[in-house]
């Protein structure tokens, strides 16, 4: 089953924003990761000033919807400003489905991060489609896919 969720990107105030959203919607954060938590082997370098920024946070809003977000980092592409600070996150059940969707959406667009295995045990990529919409495609990997 494919799930689609909003993914918000902030200029350093993601934690403040998500604490606000938590006060509005309730619930708990199942995961809060900071840039300092990325393993050295990931290949991404962050400055000391960015290490405490939010790499990923999620807040379940309902059984079907999760609000997700992060702070921006110099090492992760274009600068964030109002209007380009959100993406649509697609989660699939299979690598094949993730690949099909990623390839179809990126046709005529721009791949911002190739679809590949990640340190968080997923197959993940980011793109901007030919209409300027930002997408993230993610598939949690099963043991046999590692």
Image (spheres, rainbow, N blue to C red):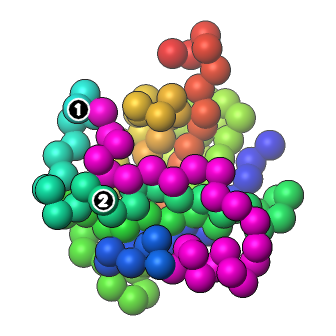
Q: Relative to the observer, which residue lies in front, 122 or 31? A: 31
Residue 77 visible in the picture: no
Instruction: Name the N-terminal-most of marks 1 and 2.
Output: 1
Secondary element at tag 2: loop
Q: Residue at x 76, y 73 (%)?
A: 26
Residue of label 1: 40
Q: Is residue 90 left or right of residue 43?
A: right
| Outermost residue to the right | 63
Disc 2: CA contacts within 10 A as few (<14), some (14-19) or many (>=20): some
**Which quadrant of the view contains residue 144?**
top right
Return the x and y of residue 5 as percentages of the image width and height.
66, 63
Give the Cα distance between marks 1 and 2.
Answer: 16 Å
Q: Residues within 10 Å of mark 1 (few under 14, many from 20)?
A: few
Which image quadrant is residue 40 in?
top left
Give the quarter of the figure containing the N terminus.
top right
Task: Write down the residue under mark 2.
Answer: 52
* Residue 18 covered by magenta stretch: yes
Q: Secondary structure at mark 1?
A: helix
Q: Is residue 37 above or below residue 144?
A: below
* Looking at the image, residue 20 lies above or below residue 91: below
Q: As drawn, is 113 to the left or to the right of 22?
A: left
Give the number of the disc on residue 49.
none
Q: Residue at 47%, 78% (x, y): give it.
A: 16
Q: Is residue 118 visible?
A: yes
- Looking at the picture, does residue 89 appear above or below residue 125? below
* Numbered range of the magenta stretch: 17-39
Residue 65 position within the rendered picture, expressed as x and y whole percent measured from the top left: 76, 63
Is 21 a magenta residue? Answer: yes
């Amino acid at each position: 089953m494919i799930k689609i969720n909003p993914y918000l990107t902030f200029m350093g105030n993601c934690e403040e924003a998500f604490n606000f959203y938590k006060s509005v919607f309730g619930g708990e954060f199942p995961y809060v990761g900071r840039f300092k938590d990325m393993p050295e082997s990931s290949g991404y370098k962050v400055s000391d000033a960015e290490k405490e920024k939010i790499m990923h946070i999620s807040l379940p809003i309902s059984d079907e919807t999760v609000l997700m977000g992060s702070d921006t980092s110099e090492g992760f592409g274009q600068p964030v400003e109002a209007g380009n600070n959100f993406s649509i996150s697609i989660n699939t059940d299979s690598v094949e489905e993730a690949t099909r969707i990623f390839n179809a959406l990126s046709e005529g667009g721009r791949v911002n991060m190739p679809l590949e295995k990640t340190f968080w045990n997923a197959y993940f990529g980011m793109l901007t489609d030919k209409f300027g919409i930002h997408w993230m495609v993610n598939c949690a990997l099963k043991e046999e896919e590692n």
